[in-house]
Image (cartoon, grey):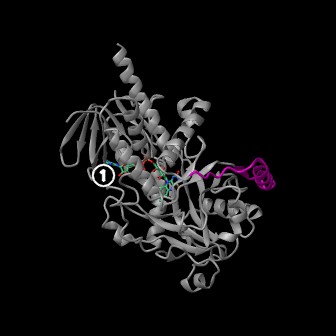
């Protein structure tokens, strides 16, 4: 069958693009994903060995993409998880897009409640942060929860099917060309438009395809750091003001950009399995909770020649840390890190913070991260301690590595069409977004680009 639009990747970017096209046109749409149906997406165990059996990784791949089994925290700002205003060159439209994406999540079962701090609360936290030179970023947020997110995605998929969208799952796309998508099994699917939205799991593949097709792309800065786990009571007062409070810090020694990210109140630390290393991440569920809160503390790293390739640098650090951990992430008590000694299970078990991820190796994070990054992180934590007293105490747990890669930014026009005619890109895999809402928004931008071209051709 010949399709009008083939979308590669059933993550938020791909699904929201399919929704936009199917709602506003009669174009027939096929969504291809190498992963499985929502219900089949089960991580065999949160262990490295078990996860090697699961290829492609169930956490990252399948219907809903990396968002399905995530905590589903929707950051409702166009400058969080990307920069939509710059991308479309229009500030007010970028806010409209965010509202539109949120409406679709709501229509498909996202909870009605929203965290939107009052002006008074925001002022209080901004003042407290500013007094130690830190910026607090207030964000309206909707928390779906990892136990509810799969249902929201299933609802959206059913809705898309009712609009005529077809899905081809467990099929890996190996090549994209003008008007043709080639699968790994050798079969070819013809389509007038191709929209590639392969997320982080397909970012390397898209970078290779871009090189093969001579589509220019640029390296992006990445974030390297750790996941911090503390008793929830320490940060509860701040969480009341913002579900995922974001602090931007420039520590003294290096003046690098350090930020808190992905705060999971009463949540769990999880492994993030890559081909050649094991990182960490965190999630929170709407119904199952822990005594701890975790968040990422990340340092922004941008490189200049001769090594602009931030991905290679990040992977090298992550592989070194995984090697030190014998194939597992490292876990260290902050007190041990400050004293320059490796943590042990005996000391960790005596501590007041019980790790929510046990498939780790007690170790020494300073052996894996560079001096500069470690200094940024320690100074960042000390600054945060003025805002969240207790966050920099000896019992605080540090998991490493946590790395937020940014895919190469594929060169496009404002409609996200590449220099190859009718070949569009969207989402994290194309370096356009770094979050559920922004990924979905870029899918909509690309979809509108396709609809615009169709309309122009129709009118001619
Ligand atoms: C554990 C975890 C927790 C997260 N929590 C949050 C959160 O709370 N809030 C938030 O905003 N963001 C969160 N994120 C990030 C968020 O999930 C991503 O930003 C978002 O899913 C990106 O959407 P996307 O559509 O660009 O790509 P993805 O969601 O990654 O989807 C891409 C899809 O493309 C498929 N694919 C890739 N290559 C191919 C190929 N060659 N052939 C066929 N299919 C292919 C993959 O199987 C995948 O299903 C989290 C991520 C993780 C891993």
Residue 64 shows in this picture:
no
The residue segment tinted magenta is 112-137
Residue drawn at point x = 64 percent, y = 54 percent: 258
Where's residue 218, x and y in %? 47, 39
Which sits in the foreground, 264 or 212? 264
Residue 78 shows in this picture:
yes
Which sits in the foreground, 334 or 110? 110
Residue 331's place in the image compared with 102, above or below, is below
* Residue beneath disc 1: 34
Where's residue 408, x and y in %? 45, 43
Does dot 1 land on a helix, a strand or a loop?
loop
Where's residue 396, x and y in %? 64, 73
Report if the beta carbon of the residue with label 1 is closer than 8 angstroms to ligand 1.
yes
Residue 260's place in the image compared with 208, above or below, is below
Residue 50 part of the magenta segment: no
- Quarter-of-image position of residue 62: bottom left
Residue drawn at point x = 44 percent, y = 72 percent: 328
Q: Is residue 373 left or right of residue 361?
A: right
- Badge 1, how many Cα within 10 Å: few under 14, some, many 20+? many
The C terminus lies in which quarter of the figure? Answer: top left
């Amino acid at each position: 069958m010949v399709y009008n639009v083939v979308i590669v990747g059933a993550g938020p970017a791909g699904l929201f693009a399919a929704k936009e096209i199917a709602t506003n046109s009669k174009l027939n749409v096929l969504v291809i994903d190498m992963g499985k149906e929502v219900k089949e997406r089960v991580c065999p165990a949160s262990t490295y060995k078990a996860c090697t059996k699961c290829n492609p990784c169930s956490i990252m791949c399948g219907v809903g993409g990396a968002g399905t089994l995530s905590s589903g925290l929707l950051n409702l700002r166009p400058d969080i998880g990307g920069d939509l205003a710059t991308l479309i060159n229009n500030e007010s439209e970028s806010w409209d897009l965010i509202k539109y994406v949120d409406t679709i999540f709501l229509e498909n079962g996202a909870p009605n409640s929203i965290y939107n701090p009052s002006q008074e609360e925001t002022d209080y936290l901004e003042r407290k942060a500013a007094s130690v030179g830190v910026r607090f970023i207030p964000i309206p947020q909707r928390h779906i929860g990892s136990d509810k997110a799969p249902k929201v995605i299933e609802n959206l998929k059913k809705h898309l099917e009712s609009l005529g969208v077809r899905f081809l799952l467990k099929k890996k796309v190996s090549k994209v060309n003008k008007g043709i998508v080639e699968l790994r099994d050798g079969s070819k699917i013809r389509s007038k438009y191709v929209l590639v939205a392969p997320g982080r799991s397909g970012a390397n593949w898209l970078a290779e395809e871009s090189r093969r097709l001579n589509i220019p792309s640029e390296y992006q800065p990445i974030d390297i750091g750790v996941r911090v786990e503390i008793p929830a009571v320490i940060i509860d007062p701040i969480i009341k003001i913002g579900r995922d409070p974001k602090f931007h810090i420039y520590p003294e020694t290096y003046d690098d950009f350090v930020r808190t990210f992905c705060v999971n109140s009463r949540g769990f630390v999880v492994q993030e399995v890559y081909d050649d290393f094991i990182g960490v991440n965190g999630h929170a569920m709407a119904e199952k909770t822990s005594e701890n809160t975790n968040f990422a503390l990340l340092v922004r790293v941008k490189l200049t020649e001769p090594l602009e390739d931030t991905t290679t640098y990040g992977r090298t650090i992550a592989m070194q840390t995984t090697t030190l951990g014998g194939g597992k992430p490292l876990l260290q008590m902050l007190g041990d890190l400050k004293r320059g000694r490796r943590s042990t299970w005996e000391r960790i078990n005596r501590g007041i913070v019980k790790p929510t991820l046990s498939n780790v190796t007690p170790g020494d994070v300073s052996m894996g991260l560079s001096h500069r990054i470690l200094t940024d992180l320690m100074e960042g934590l000390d600054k945060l301690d003025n805002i969240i007293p207790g966050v920099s105490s000896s019992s605080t747990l540090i998991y490493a590595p946590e790395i937020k890669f940014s895919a190469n930014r594929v060169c496009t026009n404002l409609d996200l069409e590449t220099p190859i005619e009718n070949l569009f890109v969207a989402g994290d895999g194309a370096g356009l977004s770094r979050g559920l809402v922004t990924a979905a928004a870029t899918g909509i931008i690309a979809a509108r680009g396709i609809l615009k071209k169709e309309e122009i051709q129709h009118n001619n």
